[in-house]
Amino acid sequence: MIQKASFLFFFLCLSFNGFCQNANSKQNKINSFTTSDGVPLFLKVSGKGEVCIFVHGGPGAWSKSFEEFGGNVLEDKLTMCYFDQRGCGRSGSPIDNNYSMDRMIDDIEEIRAHLKTDKVFIIGHSFGGILATKYTEKYPQHVKGLILLNSTLDINDSLLNQIAFMGKTLGKDFSVKSKDSILSTFFEAKQQIKKADLDYKMLSDNRTNVEKLDSIDNSEKRNSSFAQHALSGPLYFSDFTKETASIKVPTLIISGTKDNNIGPEHYRLFKFPNQEVKIINGGHILYYEQNKAFKNTVEGFVLAKK
């Protein structure tokens, strides 16, 4: 069921000896970090400066596409920590299929503790915004700043946006009869827009850029276990925008004017007390297509928090 660019919904951003003691010199270390319940996670640390953990989208994508498709420009100001979530990409799967919210965000906390750094910046891209936000909600004392990059905090709202966009693109009406029919209607519309060879428009107006992204995602075999389990229950379909009003950590929201995955107006549902919003003229992969604006926005936010 996984489609282009590894986004199921199309949105759906070990050993480090002496790492913290030398945070200002550029790091580039790849290793396998094992969680407390025995799951090996792919983890790469590269860059210099404040530590920033990147939480990729999907559900079921990986960190490689963000890193190699423009995200690594942040490494000259940030020590970027790229990891693949359990059941994703180059990481292993839990024997007991534990993909609960607490377990997913505790993986992030265990990585932070392993890196021996008290406070981190955290970037959530697409679906990863849910995990990054829930991590910040549970561990606010360890988050210096939350960055939501083209993020959804309500999958159903984003799916409704995608359905409407696909209908407009195809000149068809995909009516959603009830909340329970959102997912099935999405797949119906998705099948038709793919048949018309226009599905790349969910990510960008530029077909070539989507093909470049696909070439990264198709470069090696990836684990897709989490993607399969995330759809089996209602957990990840909750409306997490309702919780944002209680999260007081400084928050940067980056939204694209043409983000047909999340919805260009989706960010208006966020009510973080200490939030700032940056609107960039671009789609779901604006971190590549508007790379300079993306870089300057993130680095400006980080600099202001020092």
Image (cartoon, rainbow, N blue to C red):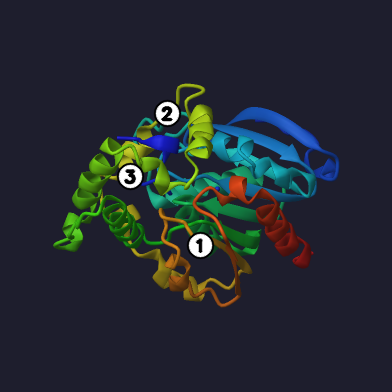
Q: Tell me residue 193's x, y (percent).
A: 28, 43
Which residue corresponds to mark 2? 223
Name the residue type under label 3: Ala
Whether residue 25 sits left or right of residue 153 in the image: it is right
Classify the position of the C terminus by image quarter. Answer: bottom right
The crowding category of the residue bearing disc 2, from other C-alpha atoms within 10 Å (few below 14, some 14 to 19, many at least 20), is: some
Q: Is mark 2 on a helix, strand or loop?
A: loop
Q: Residue at coordinates 26% horizontally, 36% vertically from top-left?
A: 195
The furthest residue to the front: 171
Name the residue type under label 1: Thr
Q: Residue at coordinates 32% horizontally, 52% vertically from top-left?
A: 169
Q: Which mark is residue 257?
A: 1
Whether residue 49 sits left or right of residue 10 in the image: it is right
Viewer-closest of 29 and 198? 198
Name the residue type under label 2: Asn
Classify the position of the N terminus by image quarter. Answer: top left
Viewer-closest of 198 and 269? 198
Viewer-closest of 43 and 280? 280
Q: Is mark 1 on a helix, strand or loop?
A: loop
Q: Residue 198 carries which label?
A: none
Which residue corresponds to mark 3? 230
Q: Measured along the vertical axis of the image, is residue 201 above or below residue 182? A: above
Q: Tell me residue 250's x, y (percent).
A: 63, 69
Asked whether the residues under the numbered discs 2 and 3 touch, taking CB atoms below 8 Å apart as contact, a structural biologist would say: no
Decide if residue 90 is in sight here.
no
Decide if residue 60 is in sight here.
yes
Disc with the residue nearer the chain's start (1 vs 3): 3
Q: Nearer the viewer, mark 1 or mark 2?
A: 1
Q: Which of marks 1 and 3 is in front?
A: 1
